[in-house]
Amino acid sequence: MLLDMNDHSLPVYKALSSPARLKIIRLLAARPYSIKELSAKLGISQTITLRHVNQLKAAGLLKFTKEGKSKISHLTVDDIKIQFPSQVQASSLSSHKVDIPVGLYTDFQIEPTCGLADLNGFIGKVDEPKYWMAPERRNARIIWFAKGYVEYEVGNFLEPGEQVQMLTLSAEMGSEIPMVK
């Protein structure tokens, strides 16, 4: 479901503004329920439960089916996105760009198969994590490992009074280990 900042989206926002209705949504995410079952789970009367469920239906978040004399509630939405009127333009914000070489990680926990390489070839021996602390790692152009993580830290270059409004991260990653020459 795609929402925006226009008045026609208000029924959904109102439907989501109630803890009881949010609990109903969580329950219905697991399986469909009758009004009687929802009422028992919520610990409120069937009349109040029906009022909550009708508001969720009016917002387009669920539908009813009939099973005998029971009215069964089913979720109709599993994702809601909100489209804001305009996106923040990165060009209108002050920015701080930091390029971190792949070998300047600050922490790591890796398991073989693993290695590092620069433009001239491997740094240390392949499949030996101890070489991941070699000073030459700062020149690495590629790193690889079968399992684990690498962690990078970036300085805080904000001036006093500045606040982060947007953060963009980019990285080049792959699932293969090319030969570096």
Image (tube, rainbow, N blue to C red):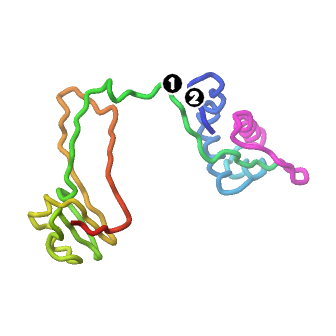
**x, y (%) of residue 64?**
80, 45
User: Which residues are the magenta region?
Assistant: 45-71
Q: In this view, does 168 lie to the left or right of 119?
A: right
Residue type, numbered disc 2: Asp
- Residue 69: within the magenta? yes
The label number, if any, that marks residue 164 in the structure image: none
Check the image and report above or below for 68 versus 22.
Answer: below
Q: Nearer the viewer, residue 13 or 147?
A: 147
The quadrant of the picture occupied by the C terminus is bottom left
Mark 1 touches mark 2? (CB < 8 Å): yes
Residue 165 is situated, as x and y percent measured from the top left of the image, at 33, 31
Q: Which residue lies furthest to the left in this view?
A: 135
- Which residue is pictured at 71% across the width and 37% down the height? 60
Q: Is 23 located above or below residue 131 in the figure? A: above
The residue that appears at 23% across and 71% down in the rendered structure is: 115
User: Which label was assigned to residue 4?
Assistant: 2
SS assignment at label 2: loop
Q: What element carries label 1?
A: loop
Q: Nearer the viewer, residue 39 or 63?
A: 63
In the image, 145 versus 35, the foreground residue is: 145
Identify the amino acid type marked 1: Pro
Q: Does the magenta stretch include residue 81?
A: no
* N-terminal label among 1 and 2: 2
Q: Name the residue under label 1.
A: 85
Position of 87 compared to 81: left or right? left
Residue 18's quadrant in the figure? top right
Residue count near mark 2 (Cα–Cα under 10 Å), binned few <14, some 14–19, many ≥20: few
Q: How crowded is mark 1: few (under 14 residues within 10 Å), some or many (20 or more)?
A: few
